Amino acid sequence: MDKKWSLSEKQLIIELAVGLARHIVNTCPPSDAEEVGPGYIFHMYTSAWENGCDVLWRLGVAHAAYGPEPHRQGMTLQTVVYEKLWPRYFKFFPESEIRDALSSDIPDTSPDLDEILSAYVGMKCQYGYAVLTETRDPIDAEELCVSEVDALILTGYMIRSGNSVIWTDKIAKAMRGAHLWDEDNRAYVDIRRQ
């Protein structure tokens, strides 16, 4: 089944993929180059990193590896199914190549938009330089990547409020998917503060 993306959704996917890859590379330590080769990262079996890596791989903008040769390169979804191996190491395309690859074609194996958004908010709200918040508190827009925010606003996941941005209800399914909001669309961090 071919997935149909609107132009604004496609642009959002591109910006989320670029932002997610950049964030993972900046927060996840590199793998042992002797194990799988230079440039690969190990997701450390941490669900947010693992989800982010998986989303980028399924979007076709990451190389996956299980370990040393013969599984070092070219791991595909078929490898996972037939050999029952799950990639532990990932190497992302450079930002310009992510943009080019996804501008021309988003593969049929890609996750749905809510999965991509869940992986994105799971990483960006909790790990490394987590400038996004899972709460509905205003977020200083100057601290954020302009292209990512613009794409989130264009598709209705955020709105502007002065110099800040705020999540809308449209992000709820993705926030729940990242285990950041409950079924009543309340941030778990806000519930714990009460």
Image (cartoon, helix red, strand yellow):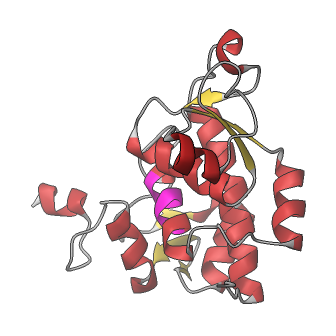
Q: Position of residue 173 (x, y in %)?
A: 38, 77
Is 123 placed left or right of 76 in the picture? left
Query: Looking at the magenta stretch, what is its main secondary structure?
Result: helix
Q: Is 95 covered by the magenta stretch?
A: no
Q: Position of residue 142 (x, y in %)?
A: 64, 59
- Seen as rendered, the residue at the extreme left is 194
Q: Residue 185's quadrant in the figure?
A: bottom left
Q: How many numbered callouts?
A: 0
Q: Residue at x 74, y 56 (%)?
A: 60
Residue extending furthest top?
Answer: 34
- The quadrant of the picture occupied by the C terminus is bottom left
Quarter the N terminus occupies: bottom right
| In-front residue for pair 63/158 | 63
Q: Nearer the viewer, residue 14 or 88?
A: 88
Residue 101's x, y, as percent?
86, 61
**The stretch drawn in magenta includes residue 120:** yes
Say whether residue 124 is left or right of residue 177: right
Residue at 86 percent across and 71 percent down: it is 103
Q: Is residue 15 left or right of residue 54?
A: right
Residue extent of the magenta highlight: 117-122
Q: Residue 136: x, y in percent? A: 36, 71
Residue at point 73% right, 55% down? 18
User: Is residue 7 visible in the rendered structure shown here?
Assistant: yes
Q: Nearer the viewer, residue 112 or 95?
A: 112
- Residue depicted at x 34% and y 65%: 135
Does residue 137 appear in this view? no
Q: Nearer the viewer, residue 151 or 44?
A: 44
- Residue 73 in the image: above or below residue 172: above
